[in-house]
Image (spheres, rainbow, N blue to C red):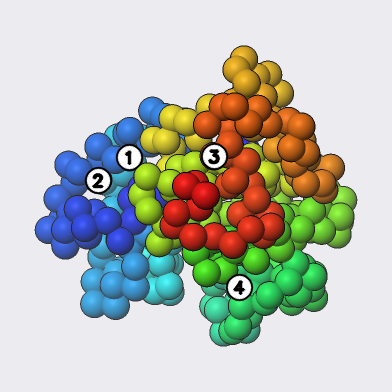
Amino acid sequence: MLKIGENIQILNKRVREALDNRDPAYLQRLARAQVEHGAQMLDLNTGPRKKDGTEVMPWLIEVVHEVVNVPLSLDTINAAALEAGLRKCQELGIGAMINSTSADPDRLNSTMPLAVKYGADIIALTMGKNLPNTADERVELAVSVIMPKALELGLDPQKLYFDPLVLTVNGTQEHAPETLNAIRYLRAVSDPAPKTVVGLSNISNSVPSENRSLINRTFLAMLLGAGLDAAILDPLDEKQNRVIEVVESKEASTPVERLYLAISEAAAAGESLDESAVDFADPEQVAIWRTVQILENRIIYAHSYLQA
């Protein structure tokens, strides 16, 4: 799985201040730390920045490229800033990804041609102007709107990553199974299968901080089982990194690791996790089991769900 580091993002106050002040030190530390922990690409989320986006994005690219040599995902809805960033990546010889386009005609027609022009990868959200509720609706948009546009423009299919949309379990947990199914269905639409990517941390947005990693890594085990190709995630989360290693190698050395592998294998088979895989005398395994029940939409999420 391609690991795309998420930590340079505008919602982080220190990142925002560093961008405003053109202070590279903190941004470079974040870039180094993510790559040292296994990130193979870095997402650079600058926000809209209507006034100075065309200045900030190229500056940020240069700052990051000074300390790490990995491809960069340019995450902005400012089309002019996006193109300025793509030009800078081309100038510096950096692989680039556009994050993102969608089936919304305005967005699709403004961003996908840039991917072709600059030879960039591109993430396509499987939504139009509104959010589809079901996996079938998301795949339909991918197949009937986004893929034909890519074909029309001559985009290499291997440069296109579909995002089947991850929403938080806090209030929208019914979408988690739909996301898993969308990945499964997308794998069947062509040969070779289209690539898929998710913003993993979205699954735990507005969840108490002490529970976010557990929810993220449990869902990631399920996503990998379903066939996920890439994720925008926090590469500094060591427990999450270990889950990736276990699932990809299929080698588990502890009971908890064996449970995560069982979770992934159940998702690969399109099945629910069998409770026989869980040692209910182990509190950590019980917490993982309850998290799976939330993600399978079998019990209703509440902040106190682990205390039930």
Camera sees residue 152 = no
Circle 3: residue type = Ala
Circle 2: residue type = Leu
In 3D space, how far apart are the residues under numbered discs 3 and 2 (Cα atoms)?
Answer: 35 Å
Q: Check disc 2 and report its element: helix, strand or loop.
A: helix
Residue under the point 59% across and 46% down = 290
Circle 4: residue type = Ser
Q: Nearer the viewer, mark 3 or mark 2?
A: 3
Residue 28 lies, with reference to residue 143, above or below; the image says above
Query: Position of 197 compared to 250: left or right?
Result: left
In 3D space, how far apart are the residues under numbered discs 3 and 1 (Cα atoms)?
Answer: 32 Å
Residue under the point 59% across and 27% down = 281
Residue 21 lies, with reference to residue 142, above or below; the image says above
Query: Position of 54 compared to 283: left or right?
Result: left
Query: Position of 85 compared to 143: left or right?
Result: left
Decide which of tag 3 and tag 1 comes sooner along the chain.
Answer: 1
Find disc 2 in the rendering and name its residue: 27
In 3D space, how far apart are the residues under numbered discs 2 and 1 (Cα atoms)?
Answer: 6 Å
Q: Check disc 3 and report its element: helix, strand or loop.
A: helix
